[in-house]
């Protein structure tokens, strides 16, 4: 990493005027002038909202910094000021290098122009010549993967096509500084995976990357440094990325209102109808859970605990190689044998990482009517990052598989490893040398 400064932010503050009604906005435009004419003291008809307050930090060339914080913390406002699309009320920003930013979906695109025309125009705005952009267009077209729509007006694009083209342009123009603000969450899983691979390539080339995301797994995986923002100011700025993520996660957990247990309080009788109703209404919206099956038996809840019994609320990031226990609460409306209960982990960008079930483990399960608990334990040497946990319950009798309850995914999980490695398995080598 170079010692040269790429971005210098000094004591930046930003205030916005908040008007209660359109009438107040008109008053603010007219009345202060009239009051001055008559020698009266000025009066404001708005309240001031301070989005940023005294923000300062230095970013070195080749560094990757992740900024995290709850909604309204000031993250996006800060990025807009760094990119020059918003002026600071106080302070200064010095950016040294060609900057490519993906702040908003299709920002800077003309809806009447075609995708090809917009790509060339955006490249020229970034300082490249038309000839240079024409040479890069095949790479942009291949990366965006929108086919013949490249020659159609932008106004005909879906939101997914917008973000594909926007990211393709920014990533393929060889920026010196890349700034990304949650824009990749719009794309599908396959495209997100392609974007993260491209960002990793840019990172290896020494591109300075500043990313705002709610995905702390991405921060753990990619960031050299992490900034936690809250209330318009920096709370944590450290190269100890794990410590920053833990601070943020614990703050988010503490801020949550009291949560109702995952056990459905209406599920007092374990009948087929009750289980089917619970399956339809009990899903984890935070991970866009999809759930299906005959519901003769369901996975009512899954809890993950550590060997010492602590829960994720106490420590929301798992250390690679740590032993975990997956505790399933299963409700069945009847006696069912030949049961297959499985759990798996995938990357958020797609691709299986790990999975196992009771059949492979040589542990037969017979469900009785009512509720029962099954526990799986395993050590998972998985590299740092954010992943998704899936589980499923099925009955396999006489070669016929009946899906009882599939929960895909049921929750997310974050891993941390003490040093960076290639791939998803954390298996550090031990090395020694000798003479012959």
Image (spheres, rainbow, N blue to C red):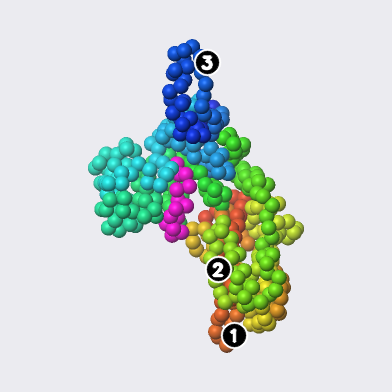
Q: Secondary structure at mark 2?
A: strand
Give the percent coordinates (x, y) of residue 243.
64, 44
Q: Residues within 10 Å of mark 1 (few under 14, many from 20)?
A: few
Disc 3 from disc 2: Cα separation: 64 Å
Name the residue that disc number 2 marks. Answer: 291
Report the Cα–Cα distance between label 1 and label 3.
85 Å
State whether residue 113 appears in this view: yes
Could you tell me which residue is drawn at 58 percent across and 44 percent down?
Answer: 70
Distance in Å between CA atoms under marks 1 and 2: 22 Å
Nearer to me, 106 or 326 = 106
Instruction: Answer left or right for 229 relative to 195.
Output: right
Give 240 or 369, whichever is nearer the viewer.
369
The answer to whether residue 181 is magenta is: yes
Q: Is residue 382 above or below residue 393?
A: above
Seen from this angle, which residue lies furthest right? 308
Residue 310: name its quadrant.
bottom right
- Camera-near label (1 vs 3) is 3
Residue that carries the numbered disc 3 in the rendered image: 41
Q: Earlier in the sequence, mark 1 or mark 2?
A: 2
Which marked residue is nearer to the observer: mark 1 or mark 2?
2
Q: Residues within 10 Å of mark 2 (few under 14, many from 20)?
A: some
Q: Is residue 432 visible?
A: no
Percent x, y of residue 433: 59, 53
| Residue on which the image places disc 1 | 397
Q: Looking at the rendering, in which quadrant would you find the C terminus?
A: bottom right
Which numbered disc, 3 or 2, marks the residue that appears first in the sequence? 3
């Amino acid at each position: 990493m170079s010692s040269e400064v790429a971005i210098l932010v000094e004591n930046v503050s930003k205030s916005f005027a908040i008007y209660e009604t359109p009438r107040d906005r008109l008053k603010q435009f007219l009345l202060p002038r009239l009051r001055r004419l008559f020698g009266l003291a000025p009066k404001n008809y708005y309240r001031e909202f301070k989005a940023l307050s005294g923000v300062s930090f230095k970013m070195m060339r080749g560094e990757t910094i992740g900024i995290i914080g709850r909604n309204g913390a000031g993250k996006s406002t800060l990025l807009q000021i760094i990119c020059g699309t918003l002026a600071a009320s106080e302070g200064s920003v010095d950016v040294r290098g060609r900057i490519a930013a993906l702040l908003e979906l299709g920002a800077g695109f003309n809806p009447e122009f075609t995708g090809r025309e917009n790509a060339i125009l955006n490249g020229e705005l970034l300082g490249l010549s038309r000839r240079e952009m024409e040479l890069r267009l095949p790479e942009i077209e291949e990366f965006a993967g929108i086919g013949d729509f490249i020659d159609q007006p932008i106004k005909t694009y879906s939101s997914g096509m917008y973000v594909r083209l926007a990211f393709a342009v920014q990533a393929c123009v060889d920026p010196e500084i890349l700034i990304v603000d949650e824009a990749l969450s719009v794309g599908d899983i396959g495209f997100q995976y392609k974007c993260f691979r491209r960002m990793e390539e840019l990172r290896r080339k020494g591109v300075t990357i500043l990313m705002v995301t709610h995905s702390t797994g991405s921060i753990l995986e990619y960031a050299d440094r992490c900034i936690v923002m809250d209330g318009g100011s920096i709370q944590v700025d450290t190269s100890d990325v794990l410590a920053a993520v833990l601070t943020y996660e614990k703050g988010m957990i503490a801020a949550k209102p009291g949560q109702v247990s995952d056990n459905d309080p209406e599920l007092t009788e374990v009948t087929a109808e009750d289980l089917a109703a619970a399956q339809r209404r009990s899903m984890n919206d935070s991970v866009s859970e999809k759930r299906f099956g005959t519901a003769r038996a369901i996975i009512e809840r899954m809890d993950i605990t550590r060997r010492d019994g602590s829960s994720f609320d106490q420590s929301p990031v798992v250390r690679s190689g740590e032993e975990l226990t997956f505790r399933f609460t299963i409700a069945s409306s009847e006696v069912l044998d030949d049961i297959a209960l499985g759990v798996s982990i995938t990357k958020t960008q797609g691709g299986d990482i790990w999975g196992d079930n009771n059949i492979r483990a040589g542990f037969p399960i017979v469900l009785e009517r009512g509720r029962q608990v099954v526990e799986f334990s395993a050590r998972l040497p998985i590299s740092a990052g954010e992943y998704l946990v899936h589980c499923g319950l099925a009955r396999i009798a006489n070669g016929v598989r009946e899906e009882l309850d599939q929960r895909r995914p049921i929750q997310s999980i974050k891993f941390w490893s003490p040093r960076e490695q290639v791939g998803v398995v954390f298996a550090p080598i031990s090395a020694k040398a000798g003479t012959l």
